[in-house]
Amino acid sequence: MKNLDDIRVEINAVDDQLLDLIVKRLNLSKEVAEYKKANDMQILDRSRELAILDRITEDKSPDLVVPLRETYESLFRVSRRRQSQLIEPDNTFINGVTSTFTDAPFPTEGSVAISSDQYDAPIAKALFDNPHLLTLNNDMKIVDAVNSGLCQYGILPIEDNRSGAKAITYDLLIKNTCHIVRGMKVSLHYKLVAANNVPFTSLKKIVVDRRSYYHCSDFLAGLKVDIIEKSAADILKQIQDPSDDFIAWIVPDHTPVGDNLHVLRQDVVNPGDYIRYICLAKNPQIHPDANCISLMLSVPNVAGGLDDVLSPLAALGVNLSLLESRPIVDGDHTTHRFFMDMDSDIHQPQVQLVINDLSRDCPTFVLLGAYKDVEMSL
C-alpha cells in the first residue's frame, strides 16, 4: 500500500495538469461566447452537453459514471455562466447595491414600530438607545408604518428554531419596499414562578403560553402536572395577583417578579433555543459591519436548477444559515421560490459577482438586505 503522503504528491501533480487544462477550457469558452454572440445563438446547448456526458462515460465502470457526470456538469455550469457574463455583461443590479454602501455605523437612535409581543420592546431597547416605540397590532401594520415613513424602523420575528421561518414575514418583504438592516438572534430564557407559599413539589398546574410550551418542552415533559395554555397577556395579568392554589407560571426571564412571587426554577428553556428577529428600514443602507445577506429567488424548473444557484456560493465557502422553499403555482406549472440567509460579506468583490449573476440568471430575484447579525440574550 502506498504511503498517504506519496499519494498526495501524485494528486498534486495531477491537479497541476488539470488546472492548466481547465484554464484552457475556460479560455475556449470565451471564444465560444464570442461566436455565439456574433451569430445570435443561445448559450445553453443541452443536446451537446448530453452528448459529451454520454461520450465520456461510455464503457466506464458503473462506479465512475456518476462522479464523471457530476464533474462535467460542474464544468458545463461554469462555462455557461462565463459565457453569459461575456455575452450579456450587465452590472446594473450590483451597482445599485453598492450605491447603498455607507461608512456610517448603524444608528443608535430612532423611532421603532413593534408589536405587543413581550420580547419586542426589550429587543428594540437593546438595539437602540432610548427608542421612540410605536406599538401596533400585527406584522402588516409594522411594515406599513416603515414603508409610509411613520417610523424609521420596524422589528419583526423571522425565524423560530422550533417552527422554522415565518413565511408571512417574507411575503410582506417581497410585496413592500422595506429592507433588512439588522438581524438579531435572541437566545431565550424562561423561569418558573409561583406565589410565595407554593412549593415546587406540590404543584398541580403550570400555565404556559404557546411559545413557552414549545421552548420549554424538555422541562415540561418530565413533570406530572396539568399544563394549561393561556395567552402571554393573560399570564402577565395572573401573576400580578397570583393564586396560591398550587399553580405556577412560565414567563420570560426578563419579566419582573413582584414581592408576592418567587422563582421556583430558573432557566427552564430547552438548551440553545432562539428566535431570530429582523430590523427593517424603508431605505436600504449597508453598513461596514454587514456580515449576512438575505435574498429571495426562483430557479428554472429543471434538473439541477437549484444546484446552479448554490454551487458558486459553495465554491466561495459561503454558509447558508437558512434555506426555505415555497411552491408557486402559475397555471399548470409549479415552480419554487427560495428564501436564503447566508453568512457572507457583500463588500467582497467575489460575492458581488455571484449576487449580480443570480440577479441576471434567476427568473425572479430580490435582495432583501445585507446587514450585521447580532446575538442577544433576554
Image: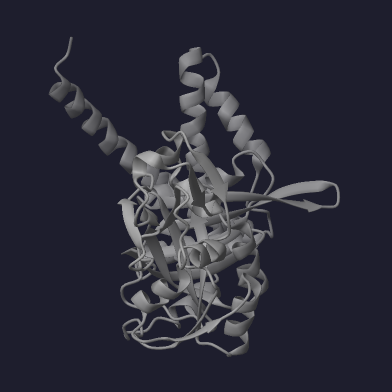
Asked if residue 39 lies left or right of residue 251, the reply is: right
Depth check, front residue: 354 or 17: 354
Residue located 61% across and 45% down the image:
305
The quarter of the rendered structure image containing the N terminus is top left
Depth check, front residue: 114 or 46: 114
Asked if residue 167 lies left or right of residue 263, the reply is: right
Residue located 65% across and 73% down the image:
140
Depth check, front residue: 8 or 376: 376
Please tell me whether residue 281 is drawn above or below residue 161 in the rendered image.
below
Examine the rendering and report whether any part of residue 369 can be seen: yes
The image quadrant that residue 8 belongs to is top left
Q: Position of residue 265 (x, y in %)?
A: 32, 49
Please tell me whether residue 198 is drawn above or below residue 251 in the rendered image.
above
Examine the rendering and report whether any part of residue 86 can be seen: no
Please tell me whether residue 122 is drawn above or below residue 39 in the rendered image.
below
Depth check, front residue: 168 or 365: 168
The quarter of the rendered structure image containing the C terminus is bottom left
